[in-house]
Amino acid sequence: MNWIGRSLPRLEDPTLLKGGGSYVADRIGKAAAVRFVRSPVARGRILDIEIPSGAIVFTGKDLSDVKPIRSILHRPDYVAIGQPVLPVDRVVFSGQAVAVVVADDPALAEDIADQVFVDIDAVDAVIEVDLALIPGAEVVHPEAPSNVLVEGRMKTSGLDQAFADAAEIITLDLRSHRQSAAPMEGRAGLATYNTATGRVTLTASVQMPHMLRTGIADMLGIAESDLRVIAPDVGGGFGQKMSLFPEYIVLVWLARKLKRDVAWIEDRRENFLASAHGRDQAFTVRGAFSREGKLLGLDANLRSNVGAFSCYPVTCGVEPLMALAELPGPYDFSEYGALSRGVATNTCMMAPYRGVSRPMLTFTMERMMEVAAKRLGLDSIDIRRRNLIDAFPHRSPTGLVYDQGSYRQAMELALETIDLPAFRARQAAMRKQGRYLGQGLSVFSERTGYGTPAYAARGMEIVPGYEIVDCTMDPSGNVELRIGSSPHGQGLKTSLAQLVSDELGIEPDRIRVISGDTDATPYGWGTFASRSMVIAGGASKLAAGKIAVKLKTIAAHLMEADPESVTLKNGWAHISNSNKAMEIGALARAAYHQSYRFAGMSPGLHENAVYDPGGTFSNACHIAIVEVDVETGGVTIERFLVAEDAGVLINPMIVDGQIAGGVAQGIANALFEEVIYDETGNLLTASFADYLIPTSAEIPEIEIVHMETVSPESVTKAKGVGEGGAIGAPAAVINAIVDALSPFGVEIFELPATPQRIRDHLRRAGVSTHG
Amino acid sequence: MASKLSISLTVNGQTYGVLVEPRRTLADVLRDDCHLTGTHIGCEHGICGACTVLVDDKPVRSCLMFGVQAEGKAIRTVEGLADGETLHPLQRAFIEHDALQCGFCTPGQIMSAVALLSEGRAGSADEIREFMNGNLCRCGAYGNIVAAIAAVASPPDGR
Amino acid sequence: MHPFTLERPRDAAAALALGAGPEGAATVYIAGGTDLLPLLKAEVGRPERLVAIGRGALDASIEVGADGALRLGAAARMSDVATHSGVSAAFPLVAQALLASASPQIRNMATLAGNLLQRTRCPYFRDAGSQACNKRRPGSGCAALEGSNRLHAVLGGSDHCIATHASDLAVALVALDASLRLRSRDGERRLPLEAFYRLPGDTPEIETVLAPGELITAIEVPPAPAFARRSQYLKLRDRASFEFALVSAAVALDTDGARIREARIALGGIATRPWRLRGVEAALAGGPADGAAYRVAAEEAADGAVPRRHNAFKVELLKRALVRALETAGGRL
């Protein structure tokens, strides 16, 4: 029985469904309550902080021995900024924590926090990315007088010639407005103090427990062994929970200082104000096209608003440098020039949010293809056919090597499934009735499962990428898999169990996956960047494979056969061409209790493996069919199709769930979600009433069809897929809106396309439904 | 500090005698005083629906009610759905249809779904989507949630 | 949330006694609490005493009388009224407005009177931090005037406040000439709902004519059989569901399909209180029930509108919404 490829119901589910999930807030017991006092203004000098008498309140002055968070990239064009855990001199974004209150319960902590008076000499702030670049703009950090914290450039030698040769040059200005990952569970931490040993355990809602341990230990100047970090059940992360936040350092500091347990559960407003934002980007791109629609060269000026600090450990370079390296996407051209800058402003810091720069990159290239097709009088599918990469491996002008993919094939499959001619007929008929339907497409590649080489290439000081997995089979034949990856909803415990099941021939429910505890798992990098099935999966398969070898050796010895003839299946070791078989449990017992019999083999069944791959590219094509209400600017999505190639699917049901979930975020990115600051840096969207994440009513049934391109770059033959839905959906939806409004000549280059923006376009196009 | 009130809450058929300040919400009282942490708090402002419980069979936002307002009413939380080891049909359907990912919104989803079914409003997928629009899911499992509810409302083999 | 004492009176007389006299002046009544709790959590208002009223203290009944008039107890839940067969049949505009509000869970908890008394959604009002807000802190200024005012009013505002009133139910009731019954320890009175809401003027902190110690006890809607078949509550918002209106229109037509005898029209989301459009009603009365007539009449709907920096789009949008609602109610769509 093969477990890989089966939609096994998740092993995690029954507990969660009975209300037995254990998130941080469920574990706080009698811990003291911690509440942060936050700056009400975006920029200014701290004059004084008045503390009510008798209250336990700490400010930056009390934490002077704590090192600032300093995220490093080894590049000459990167300015490292220190982020004080609690600032002493100045605040740089509205919501920045400036003091911390400890009290017996949360209500009391809130009461006291309200009485802490923070006197700040507020001055003008700079909020918008392009305004921050204007000479003379307010300077966020004196170390970076131009507000540019990181800059990357490249230019291929033939770029100018490509533009000289072009029949058509298309210049586009695109804008993606700020987004927030907004996981249902906000940030939360419980720091418990062991009075006997002095050791602190931090239980926190995070995606990277080991990295948190390293960072906190570094900033506090303690040994990593003095700290244990546990990620329990985590209520979503989407990238937001992979950065080290000052609040977690403060929690551990408090536990050590007060020698008591302390807990912080942030509220929704704090999560919007002070966790991390993403995708606040402005791109100016020029494409040089031949008369036949071949993209000859691309020149790009990319600006990413990175907020007030550089996230740790991936740094503020993550959005701009990824944009620089991956803008070419699935398209085949050699000449490329780009300047990409990460710009500081007095806003909440940027950190990765599902897809990072890729939603905007895909939006850019897909709009470019559509505009080019129109300008050149070509069909927009044909222009893509002419430009999509179809020979592999492919080396991009930025030096990325794309392994085997199916960019064209996925597009053709999607088109076939959607039946475009039938849609066009219906579209024409509806237009006569004054109804505007449109179809839009996006094709993209998704860089996934990349190990240390990719991160090292960026110059990161802390280079993530590998995963180490410990695999142990106990004497009963049951397995414990200890991973450094740390799930936050992806069903890793199920899919990894399936992988290991196939290696060892036992049922998935005999495999226990242990994650999220730095005391109990090998050093690892958590879950992000669509990596887990590739990297943790790869290491799991390799580790389990080593145990399989031992089991086969033992079986062969005990049943007097050739190890090559042993098959592990359904809990038994079978000898082929015979009816000899032994229970795997019996083999396991022998490994531990009869070890002397197996000369040359270590006792027990305990192996580990490391996997650190170069990375692999999955790909997909998204097609959206929408209807636009030209009077209100409202958009309804009638149909959404994904044709996805993520290699071998370990658990198709879980994969589809990740795709559909990403698409929901992508649709919302296209239509509703926008973090809005006013000019003074005051956050206007600090609740779910203002920042509109989608409800069940906005998201249609997502149709998914799969292709399977197997890559040698992944031991499990799976490619990563977690971010793809969020990457391709915005472009598909916007292209569909533009198609719907093509009678009016409306072009959209901004996300989200809110009803008001659509109405503004229509008004400018002179559309009136009067008379 | 205002004095505490002694109240008696009936949750999942069991009586809990608790001493609470009037300003404590029902969500907090259920979690901290009754130790039923299955009900989660996602926004404390009544928008996300993670805190949904049934009060006299109607789905309500427990973060928007004071605990004392729930006295004398029959409260049902996610912990009261399964019958010992036997899962409620909705719980089984949620597993079969992969209707959860991180699990944080799930108790609220399922309590709303229980009400939806008992009120007979799960006629079509659109009707289900409309009724469930007060329960946010950031993992985006909406399609599967709707499918799970529809499967229980009209089981394919007429069971 | 600031601590408070909670009284739980057993009947209306006890509830009213708690609100009476000088000590009663600072009493805040709470029924469903769905608007009040978020305000308390955000520290907008820090009452020392809350008085819980609900089905015990106040009437929650729903009745369509023999004369066709609708009588709703103040404590009736939104969901109960929205799904009441008598209401859906005789006053579909009310049912529609209720179903367009909030979410199923909130509708199960919230009372009609609470819905009518809800405070504005203006973010400067709801952020008790440092924002200037004359409604929350008289004399502190209005941050919305020069700030982010996309969601604010184009009608009925002043230099002191441009916050919109958010209740969908109020818009439908104003269109239907509803009245309120109010009761205090000293007696009862009745007044039109339209007269209940004040314009902000220079005292935006006083939103209604409700006196201290006074409670809404009932909502009465006169019989409207001619309007029942042709009515529509249209709510336009950024997201398809669960959100406050950018613009809403409550429209009811007494028409034979070809000509309009009478119209009842009110708009929401665009003014500081529900905005009845008697001028537009007069323009339509006696005229044809067709798109051209609607569009001409709708041009008047924005008379007196003062657009602000970010909400000028509402001026055009409200006309479009009105035409759309008229076309739906009139049976063209």
Image: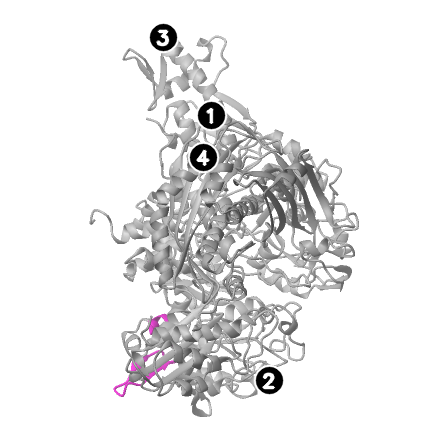
Say which amino acid is labelled 4. Answer: Ala
Q: Identify the subunit bearing mark 4.
A: A
Tell me, for residue C201, which label it has, or none.
2
Say which amino acid is labelled 2. Answer: Gly
Q: How many marks?
A: 4
Region of the chain picked out in magenta, as a range: C57-82
Dot 2: what SS?
A: loop
Q: Nearer the viewer, mark 3 or mark 1?
A: 1
Q: Identify the subunit bearing mark 3.
A: A
Residue with the mark numbered 4: A646
Residue with the mark numbered 3: A561
**Is residue A198 in view?**
no
Q: Identify the subunit bearing mark 1.
A: A
Q: Residue at x 39, y 37 (%)?
A: A706
Q: Position of residue A736 (x, y in %)?
A: 45, 52
Which quadrant of the figure contains the N terminus of chain B? bottom right
